[in-house]
Image (spheres, rainbow, N blue to C red):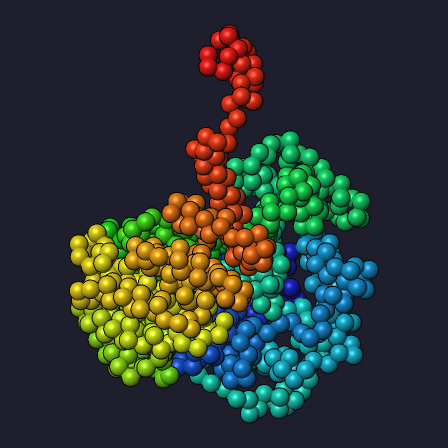
């Protein structure tokens, strides 16, 4: 086909991108066809306003599982073709199979080149065992891309390898689009596509009726397309993108830096290490440059590539430290660049509402993990917290909550990281509402009404609604919770649900979003736990006792919050008078029951001992470890009593004296018998905890010996005392001096 130039490229190849840009300037085409979904033709005009990496997102409205992405970086040949066309007034059209067909067929991502790896085949023919290194040497390190040579090579690779049905349909549609451009009178047509497809678009094409037969009757759906931000992380192979590359940050550097790329790259790596507080001098950079070029010469490469640069970084700048190498790999080789789309890009109202919140709350999306600490007493931080919690309800985990470093409930710590798929999640949630708050409230109501839903799920949902400040959703969620709690007879379910309810009310008070209905539900749940717990602890095996022990500890911590009000509200949760007393009385009654599992009895004794409600803890321990009990039960009792780590033994002199007294009082044969059991318990402590406990015991032993005068023989010590006094210059040499 005269007047048609087919430019075979590698997706996201900087050398191909430069060559396409230069070739288009030479050809001056009157239309450009680019591999991609034709439904996006109307979005091409937005490209100059976008900041790559970006992606075309195709989705089926109302069908959240049907979506596909076509990513573009600044160094993608297709992107450079689009920019050339928009800058010179040349029409740009996409020529791949429509997204309406690919989504109907269930394709979830941009199609990869082919089942056969053409780059790998050419690399093997050229004597290379690494396809990436072959492409760098033959294409990326050249001043231009030999399109005719690549086309000839691909034709040779395709001989004997017929494309599968999906590839055949894609190429048939490309030919259909090319024929349409010719019929419309275009005389200089440039086609930019993957190199694999070049032989299918050049030479003698198949008859039109053959292509029509391939495309006839394809299933289709209604597809909507838009631009969304993308990241270099998602361009990497290990992100699962079929036509990805392993080093987008390196390729960005090669495309944007024309002069001395190796030297500038190594200087940037040194600057990154210095920013991390590591000592890297100019001499390191000079030596690394020499090593990179020397390695390229030894390996017979025209220029130093990523392999040589990485080896130089590891040997010189990082001094063999793989942790530093990984830092450079993540921040530079892959990169943390996040693209940007403009307000003129088609968006659902939910996306626009989020963008407005991001601007107003000064929360800029970033592709790199960023820690954010919020003080909930400040209006700005409180609004930020509510936004992040609302987004999590919508499945947009932009922020991941962490443990607050402060001791109060006023602070939250978040780790922020924006991912491209969050735009898809927002589009999926668009039917729930036009604002983030409205959509999150509707999602909370849907979750409350979902079946099946557990009591723990509902209590967690109440807590999330309070954290997100969704008062319009709370009545529906609380009604579902009350109904579920009224019919749930499993005390373990009630115990699993209570802590979240207490936290919800407590932190709701801190945020100024308290809900009075919670207090009534909490009181009812606690009463039912106290009544049902005696039955729940009966007849437990080891696994059941371990699971119930976790619930007992959680309820005990929650009950402590009932009488420990946050400073913001000045009063405890109004769960009724005597909540703590009722709980402690229940535990006291249980601890006296015969037949308890040793783990449960030991833990109950410990809780009562810590609360000052057990005056005979020593007696209980002695009975639990008596010869009448099997060693396994004794071990379980000690494990329950000492659960939670060894720090309490270090800081609680009473508890340490109790355990030490029992151990030192054991006969030698009994101590030998229980020693393996004690190792099992103390083995759960960290090494610093074990060391600290040992030092406290040793110090207590020295103090005890000094208090016993009979341990010192004054007559035998007199000579040593005299010598010491003489050394000190006090003379006399007498012990009474």
Q: Toward which corner of the image does residue 586 lie, by quadrant?
A: bottom left
Q: Toward which corner of the image does residue 320 lie, by quadrant?
A: top right
Residue sitting at x 58%, y 67%? 240
The answer to which of 331 and 689 lies nearer the viewer is 689
Task: Report if residue 331 is visible in the image.
Answer: yes
Residue sitting at x 78%, y 79%? 160
Of the 4 image quadrants, the one containing the N terminus is bottom right
Looking at the image, residue 50 sits to the left or right of residue 463; the answer is right
Residue sitting at x 20%, y 64%? 578
Q: How many marks?
A: 0
The answer to which of 507 and 666 lies nearer the viewer is 666
The answer to which of 172 and 318 lies nearer the viewer is 318
Tell me where residue 396 appears, x and y as whole percent: 40, 66
The answer to which of 187 and 719 lies nearer the viewer is 719
Tell me where residue 346 appears, x and y as whole percent: 38, 69
- Rendered view: 240 above or below 292: below
Tell me where residue 728 appears, x and y as whole percent: 51, 11
- Rendered view: 98 above or below 470: below
Tell me where residue 591 appears, x and y as whole percent: 36, 66
Looking at the image, residue 421 sits to the left or right of residue 385; the answer is right
Task: Report if residue 441 is visible in the image.
Answer: no
Residue sitting at x 65%, y 84%? 165
Looking at the image, residue 165 sits to the left or right of residue 529; the answer is right
């Amino acid at each position: 086909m005269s007047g048609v130039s087919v430019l075979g490229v590698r997706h996201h190849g900087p050398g191909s991108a430069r060559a396409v840009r230069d070739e288009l300037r030479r050809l001056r085409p009157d239309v450009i066809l680019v591999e991609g979904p034709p439904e996006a033709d109307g979005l091409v005009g937005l490209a100059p306003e976008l900041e790559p990496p970006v992606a075309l997102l195709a989705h089926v409205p109302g069908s959240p599982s049907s979506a596909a992405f076509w990513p573009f970086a600044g160094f993608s040949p297709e992107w450079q073709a689009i920019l050339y066309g928009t800058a010179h007034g040349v029409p740009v059209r996409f020529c791949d199979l429509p997204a309406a067909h690919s989504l109907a067929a269930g394709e979830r991502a941009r199609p990869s080149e082919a089942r056969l790896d053409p780059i790998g085949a050419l690399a093997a023919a050229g004597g290379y065992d690494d396809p990436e290194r072959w492409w760098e040497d033959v294409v990326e390190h050249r001043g231009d891309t030999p399109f005719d040579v690549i086309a000839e090579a691909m034709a040779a690779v395709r001989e004997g390898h017929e494309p599968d049905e999906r590839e055949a349909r894609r190429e048939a549609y490309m030919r259909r689009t090319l024929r349409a451009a010719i019929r419309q009178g275009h005389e200089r047509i440039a086609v930019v596509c993957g190199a694999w497809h070049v032989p299918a678009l050049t030479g003698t094409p198949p008859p039109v009726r053959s292509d029509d037969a391939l495309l006839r009757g394809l299933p289709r759906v209604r597809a909507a397309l838009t631009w969304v931000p993308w990241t270099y992380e998602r361009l990497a192979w290990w992100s699962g993108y079929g036509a990805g590359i392993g080093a987008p940050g390196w390729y960005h550097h090669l495309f944007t830096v024309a002069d001395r790329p190796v030297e500038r790259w190594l200087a940037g790596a040194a600057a990154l290490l210095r920013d991390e507080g590591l000592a890297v001098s100019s001499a390191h950079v000079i030596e690394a440059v020499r090593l990179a070029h020397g390695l390229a010469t030894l390996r017979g490469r025209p220029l130093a590539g990523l392999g040589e640069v990485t080896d130089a970084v590891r040997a010189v700048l990082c001094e063999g430290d793989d942790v530093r190498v990984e830092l450079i790999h993540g921040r530079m080789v892959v990169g943390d660049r996040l693209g940007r789309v403009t307000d003129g890009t088609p968006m659902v109202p939910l996306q626009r509402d989020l963008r407005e919140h991001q601007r107003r709350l000064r929360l800029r999306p970033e592709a790199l993990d960023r820690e954010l600490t919020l003080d909930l007493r400040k209006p700005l931080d409180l609004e930020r917290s509510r936004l992040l919690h609302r987004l999590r309800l919508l499945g947009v985990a932009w922020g991941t909550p962490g443990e607050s470093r402060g001791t109060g409930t006023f602070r939250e710590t978040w780790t922020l990281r924006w991912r491209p798929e969050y735009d898809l999640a927002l589009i999926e949630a668009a039917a729930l509402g036009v604002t983030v708050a409205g959509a999150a409230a509707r999602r909370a109501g849907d979750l409350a009404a979902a079946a099946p839903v557990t009591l723990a799920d509902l209590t967690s949902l109440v807590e999330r609604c309070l954290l997100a400040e969704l008062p319009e959703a709370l009545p529906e969620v609380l009604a579902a919770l009350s109904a579920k709690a009224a019919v749930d007879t499993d005390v373990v379910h009630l115990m699993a649900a209570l802590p979240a309810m207490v936290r919800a009310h407590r932190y709701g008070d801190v945020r100024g979003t308290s809900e009075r209905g919670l207090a009534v539900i909490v009181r009812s749940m606690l009463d039912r736990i106290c009544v049902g717990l005696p039955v729940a602890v009966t007849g437990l095996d080891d696994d059941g006792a371990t699971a119930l022990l976790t619930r007992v500890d959680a309820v005990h911590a929650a009950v402590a919050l009932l009488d420990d009000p946050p400073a913001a509200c000045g009063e405890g949760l109004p769960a009724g008078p005597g909540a703590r007393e009722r709980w402690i009385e229940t535990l006291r009654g249980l601890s006296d029951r015969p037949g308890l599992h040793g783990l449960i009895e030991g833990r109950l004794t410990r809780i009562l001992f810590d609360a000052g409600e057990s005056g005979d803890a020593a007696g209980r321990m002695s009975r639990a470890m008596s010869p009448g009990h099997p060693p396994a039960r004794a071990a379980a009792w000690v494990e329950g009593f000492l659960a939670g780590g060894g720090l309490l033994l270090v800081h609680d002199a009473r508890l340490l004296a109790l355990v030490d007294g029992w151990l030192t009082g054991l006969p030698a044969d009994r101590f030998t018998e229980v020693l393996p059991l004690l190792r099992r318990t103390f083995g759960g402590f960290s090494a610093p905890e074990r060391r600290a406990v040992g030092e406290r015991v040793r110090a207590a032993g020295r103090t005890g010996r000094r208090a016993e005068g009979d341990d010192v023989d004054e007559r035998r010590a007199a000579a040593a005392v005299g010598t010491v006094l003489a050394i000190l210059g006090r003379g006399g040499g007498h012990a009474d001096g």
